[in-house]
Amino acid sequence: LKPLEKNLENIKKNKPSVILIAGVNGVGKTTTIGKLGKILAQNNKKIIFGAADTFRAAAVDQLEVWAKKINADILRGEEGSDPASIVFKSLDESKLKESKVIIIDTAGRLHTRNDLMDQLGKINRVLKKIDNNFPHETIMTIDATTGQNALNQVDIFKEMAEISGLIVTKLDGSAKGGILLSLAEKFRLPVHAIGVGEKIEDLQSFAAKEFAESLMGLEN
């Protein structure tokens, strides 16, 4: 696990730095974005949230609450509008505001839904057309309670977007996070952070040694 540590604060110093967040339904993706924005805002980085989840109004409202908490800007479109158009507008706006980090929220989608997976691919293609280096990071959120199905999820998401790293959520419950070992062995993707609760400070940079000790019951 040690080589997979990738501290959240070491986001590439691009202007803007574009981070795309993806994952299946119910993994805590929007909440994770809010927490990630808080961490980056503490490092004097101007944050813009791109609300590209246009299918679930509640997700956009939730993201707006987070934006107010951390003094971030948010760009949202009409419900049901093309998510790729929101991405395009977000990047255009980020240049106007000289934003340092833009974090794009995408709709939660089951990896078995081909139409929604194609849409994720379209978002990725739109980003590449704006700048071939976009997105600088494509982070997939994984629910620690998912079990072995998480391997299938990552496999299919990687086909549609170049997943560059993982954030593992819901490690505050019964899940010990053993699935992270399987993901590490198969994909060797960097682990940016783990989510250990609902509070704004409950997104922690991944520390391999501490995680392994906890997994083996050796914390004490």
Image (spheres, rainbow, N blue to C red):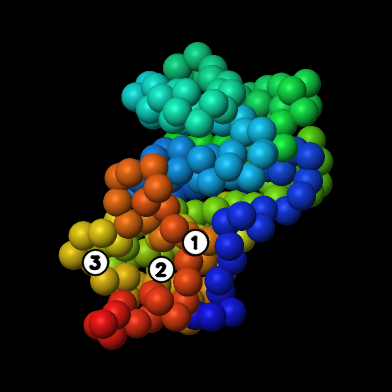
**Is 88 positioned to the left or the right of 184 in the image?**
right
At 38% from the left and 27% from the top, the residue drawn is 62
Element at label 3: loop
**Residue 119 place in picture, x, y as percent:** 54, 38
Q: Which amino acid does the dot numbered 3 rest on?
A: Ala
At 44% from the left and 58% from the top, the residue drawn is 204
Q: Is residue 146 above or below residue 113?
A: below
Mark 1 vs mark 3, CA separation in Å:
18 Å
Q: Is residue 191 visible?
A: yes
Q: Which of pointers 2 and 3 lies earlier in the amino acid sequence?
A: 2
Mark 2 vs mark 3, CA separation in Å:
16 Å
At 42% from the left and 38% from the top, the residue drawn is 30
**Residue 123 place in picture, x, y as percent:** 62, 38
Element at label 1: strand
Residue 205 image label: 1
Element at label 2: helix
Q: Which amino acid does the dot numbered 2 rest on?
A: Leu
Q: Is residue 29 visible?
A: no
Q: Is residue 72 above or below residue 27?
A: above
Residue at the far top: name it. 78
Q: Which of pointers 1 and 3 lies earlier in the amino acid sequence?
A: 3
Mark 2 packing: few (<14 Cα in 10 Å), some, or many (20+)? Answer: some
At 37% from the left and 55% from the top, the residue drawn is 195
The residue that label 2 is drawn on is 151
Residue 175 image label: 3
**Is 20 positioned to the left or the right of 204 in the image?**
right
Q: Please name which of the two marks, 2 or 3, marks the residue nearer to the observer.
A: 3
Q: Please name which of the two marks, 2 or 1, marks the residue nearer to the observer.
A: 1
Mark 1 packing: few (<14 Cα in 10 Å), some, or many (20+)? Answer: some
Q: Which amino acid does the dot numbered 1 rest on?
A: Ser
Q: Quadrant of residue 32?
A: top left
